[in-house]
Image: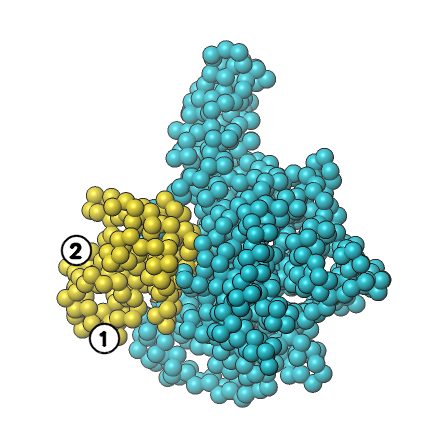
Chain colours: A cyan, B yellow
Amino acid sequence: MGKMIGESIKRVEDHRFITGTGEYTDDIVLPRMTHAYILRSHLAHAKIKSVDTTAAKSADGVVAVFTGEDVAHINGIPTGWQVNFTDGEVMREPKHPLLVKDKALHVGDGVAIVIAESKEQARDAADLIEVDYEELSVVVDASKALEAGAPMVHDELPDNRAFDWQLGDKVAADTGMAKAHHVTKMRIRNQRMIANAIEPRSYIGDYSKARDKYTLYTSSQNPHVIRLLMCAFVLGIPEHKTRVVSKDVGGGFGSKIFHYAEEALVTWASQQIARPVKWTAERSEAFVTDAHGRDHNTIAEMGFDKDGNITALRVHTDANLGAYLSTFAPAIPTYLYGTLLQGQYVTPAIHVTVNGVFTHTTPVDAYRGAGRPEATYLLERLIDTAAAEMGMDPAELRMKNFIPAFDGVEQPGYQTQVALQYDSGDYEATMRKALDVLGYNDLRKEQEEARKQGRYIGIGFSSYIEACGIAPSAVVGSLGARAGLYESANVRVQPTGKVSVHTGSHSHGQGHDTTFAQVAADHLGIALEDIEIIHGDTEQVPFGMGTYGSRSLAVGGSAIVKALDKVKEKGAKVAAHLLEASEQDLEYIDGKWTVKGTDKSIGFGEVALASYVPHNFPEGLEPGIEFNSFYDPANFTYPFGTYIAVVEVDAETGTTEIKRFVAVDDVGNVVNPMIVDGQVHGGLAQGIGQALLEGAVYDESGQLTTGTYLDYAMPRADDLPSFEVDRNVTPCPHNPLGVKGCGEAGAIGSTPAIVNAVVDALRPLGIKDLEMPLTPQKVWAAIHNANA
Amino acid sequence: MKVSMTVNGVAVSHDVEPRTLLVQFLRENLGLTGTHVGCDTSSCGACTLILNGEAVKSCSLLAAQCEGAEVTTIEGLAASDGTLHPIQEGFREKHGLQCGYCTPGMIMSSVQLLQRNPNPSDQEIRHALEGNFCRCTGYDNIVKAVQWAASQS
Ligand code: FES
Ligand code: FES
């Protein structure tokens, strides 16, 4: 081991992408394929009095039109996680129909699907459908939806709640707060975000009558999960006769985890018309139908003793879930949020309460980081604000409260107040490294100087921790997950010694074709070129839970390692037989079994061939070498780090310029540093986007006023700096690769660093808090008001 | 209506509806799916290609407007023997792509950038690529990819 792991190998998948030969779902053309267009409600809440499809049905090129009535007998889209009320009442799960029949509950709710020979014909025909709506009153804000007399989203649910939830020790937190010498209390809004993968969602349903088989091509992060949900819970079609294929996928960031109505619709419709049906979202449609992220209204308070030690944390959050429960929605503001409120700190008492609330908006679910950014944001805003209020240095206040280093081997894992047990960590080390890279002390002096000249420079910190490598099945099962969160792998050694690795993880930009091949190459001691990574097809891969929650390498990679171990174990038996030696006398080095202390050896390729041409083979041993494995992690993994942003705010215009961004992460062992850096960069960009630019805004009538790229400001190249990325390594003690995961870190840690920096810059003006995104208008207004 | 143009050096001609966009013509009529669609407001740049020597967003042009034009798409950028264009190499060398969806458009915009400014600074590259969204990379490695390509000549 050790030749490939740790190297920045150039990605093997890149060739197809840089030559325009990737295979995204919308690129696929099937014989006799039809095209679907979905007519959607333009109102956020409306009774549907009638739908007249007569004209549409006879329009040019139209093959079929289906409405909510036609699919009313089909089950709704299910939810994969159950969070019950604190008083024991079962979570409320109103039906999420494939198309609505009686009532539209958010802008973008599907009303009818038109299938035609071309997409244009389908769209033209949809224009001819007459829908008679009766507009009803609307609520878009989670806290307002809880008020007495608020408009009801689901008729049967008067208080608009799906569940309420709590975690931690209320009495201890109240006591800790009561004895605090200083309390910092903040109202924190974590605004609604839209993932906006650049590839819009795209699906093709293809029913084969000849074989009575369904195929769904989908831009999904987890094809097996989609197959299971769609077959077993929605359409009631046989899982073994359904193939779900997810080839190249153009980014996900969470938004392509979930099972969407359109997947089931095209699959069902294809069976109805006995032709393939393709649907690809237009961007404006993606804005109102891709599940959104975040959207928390929070009140949080942190107590400190007179030396600055944290005594307690209390948090209450109203989490907006949108109109229906999306696949993972209940887990995000609960088990992926409340459980992270320990942060990196020795907070002795924590209590959090959450309301999960329905509103007339697009469903909300996981978006890069999913719950952990919300937790980190409030912790890091609180501690920064507290430092200012108590006149302490924000870096020092953090370090004073950090959990001491522990490796999870010699020292045990750290048991938090909020259910999790951290695996290993050295929080002070990443902070110190970040301070070093930044040159903190000099920068503070520079800031002082600048202030004298009327320039507003700010330094903002964020020390984050996250739980990834999702997740030990028994643990998540006890917390309400309706699935296990292991991963599977299959390693097939071919007769020529080439190796096919099938993984249940899914790459939509993460580079698994390369990273996983590096792992396999090292374990087998064979060339990278002799390994092929296969994913994204339920007919090729035994099973899979997919890619999200920074789980691919920690869980999927570990499954591969387990299967590789089995390969080597069997290979050793074959080698021993062929070398006429005992297995114990063999060692496996550089792709060869050698009899220790001799020059007698046999290569991996020869053993592979002998296994498929078993003329001279150990008695009783089956021919062939192929192994499956399922890996269920022992714990979550807990990457962490400290980020520091340096900004300058132009007080005249309110514009924020990021002068530097230092990110020091500890994601455990690293297989491909180039890819890890890239993941961190991408996360930083999204987190910075949330801090400064992005935010989904609904008006009072439930219209998404940020429904195009002209209104929803995603970071462009000149909005961002060049990042200064560095790393420490504290290996994960409980998986074979010692890895923790790096996909979400950047998005979790960067947001508070930026906001803290801007507030730090403007503190001399009396500004203590700002609500994201920190657009120039907002910052300018705050400066203006502060001066007034 | 009939539309004829030269795409990646090959003369092509198809009957299309007048409202057919250039990007649709390429993807649907010619099967050249390397040019991607990421939006409906000409904002994302995923559909960028070279039309008569200029980088353009092919979602904002009708195929009919391109009658007689010379078009180069991502599929036509490498030499006929398969040798990659330095920008294509640069994106791989510097990990300038993750999911690859924005990549063809990014590469085509970068080609034009280097034609106009063979030695761009960090800021010049960021400015020139303003019309192209990437949601994956945070742009840092894209800037490095372009600089790498610039350093090759
Ligand atoms: S598809 Fe977005 S600019 Fe052309
Ligand atoms: S690489 Fe995915 S959008 Fe740029």
Q: Does A364 sit above or below residue B75?
A: below
> What is the chain letter for disc 2?
B
Q: Amino acid at mark 2?
A: Gly
- Seen in the image, is A418 located left or right of residue A769? right
- Seen in the image, is B97 located left or right of residue A481? left
Q: Does A344 sit above or below residue A653?
A: above
**Residue at image point 72% right, 68% down:** A185
Question: In the structure shown, which secondary structural element does the residue marked by tag 2 occupy?
Answer: loop
Q: Is residue A772 visible?
A: yes
Closest to the observer, A387 or A447: A447
Closest to the observer, A482 or A783: A783
Q: Amino acid at mark 1?
A: Pro
Between circles 2 and 1, the one closer to the viewer is: 2
Q: Position of residue A764 (x, y in %)?
A: 61, 69
| Distance CA(mark 2)–CA(mark 1) | 24 Å
The residue pinned by badge 2 equals B9
The residue pinned by badge 1 equals B18
**Residue at image point 40% right, 66% down:** A280
Q: Position of residue A31 (x, y in %)?
A: 32, 59
